Image: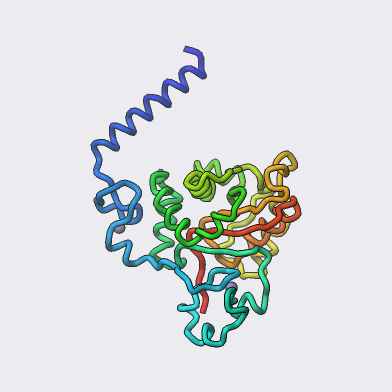
Amino acid sequence: MPARGMLAHMQTVTMIARRALDAVLPPTCAKCRVVVERNGTVCADCWKDLRFLAPPWCHSCGFPFEFEGAETVSQGRGNADAPLCADCLHKPKSFDRARAALGYDDASRALILAFKHADRTETAMTLANWMALAGGDLLAAADVVVPVPLHWRRLFLRRYNQSALLAQKLAQSRGIAFHALVLERRRATRPQGHLSGTARHRNVAGAFRVRPSQRGQIEGRRVLLVDDVYTTGATIAACVASLRAGGAAAVDVLTLARVLRT
Ligand SMILES: [Zn+2]
Ligand SMILES: [Zn+2]
């Protein structure tokens, strides 16, 4: 059997084996692996630990006002239809609007880790549905959905880019164009976990660009940039700058989770 035929054959065998396993094994919680009713969902205990974000929130960054305290809302910062949080008033953001489905905390961190490091592609549909709830307006306005890319070396280690998977499910669910290759990570950046905000911005500045062959996909269009977590916003800001330089008319950002600072 030629090598390619053999590979296809092995893939088919693996797929059939996988389906057979899925049929025998009960579906488990995407986070803690207790048995649940349907694949790709979380159990009731994990569900109640998650912090789902909802309006009223900052028109720019999606920061929930309930979290910041009633004071901000009553002060009516920004205009009444598009209130802004204190952070966005002081430092206007480079994106048009950002929304997230969950607050980033121990519960969502564990869920994202489970999603990242295991074969949990079936979870992507559930998570994308949560994101669609938070980012309905953004999806309705989007012309094209683009994920934050991983460097190929990290992609190779992880086997898939979870942001691309989420972006693809979101685009599919609304019939929006999805282009995974628009942004290119030109160099592997250091892991950002232990860096301060300023160091993070320095770490990722110039790390991304729009592939010249892909410019046509975003020129003059409203782009929805998708990532798993919004932390300091350094990675997002670097991607937004690249997309604008590449000709995007507007850039909104939708993430699964975001850090909530008080
Ligand atoms: Zn669970
Ligand atoms: Zn804000």
Can residue 162 be seen here? The reply is: no
Horizontally, residue 43 falls left or right of residue 142, namely left
The percent coordinates of residue 105 (x first, y second) are 43, 68
Say which residue appears at 47% left-offset and 12% top-offset: 1
Q: Is residue 199 above or below residue 39?
A: below
Front-most of residues 177 and 190: 177
The percent coordinates of residue 219 (x first, y second) are 72, 48
Front-most of residues 108 and 141: 141
Question: Which quadrant contains ligand 2?
Answer: bottom right
The percent coordinates of residue 194 (x first, y second) are 57, 66
Q: Is residue 42 above or below residue 260?
A: above
Q: Is residue 23 above or below residue 63?
A: above
Total number of numbered discs in the rendering = 0
Check the image and name the residue furthest to the front: 81
Front-most of residues 55 and 206: 55
Horizontally, residue 58 falls left or right of residue 246, namely left
Say which residue appears at 40% left-offset and 68% top-offset: 51
Say which residue appears at 60% left-offset and 64% top-offset: 97
Front-most of residues 211 and 77: 77
Q: Is residue 63 above or below residue 139?
A: below
The percent coordinates of residue 129 (x first, y second) are 43, 53
Colouring of the image: rainbow
Can residue 228 be seen here? The reply is: yes
Say which residue appears at 25% left-offset and 40% top-offset: 25
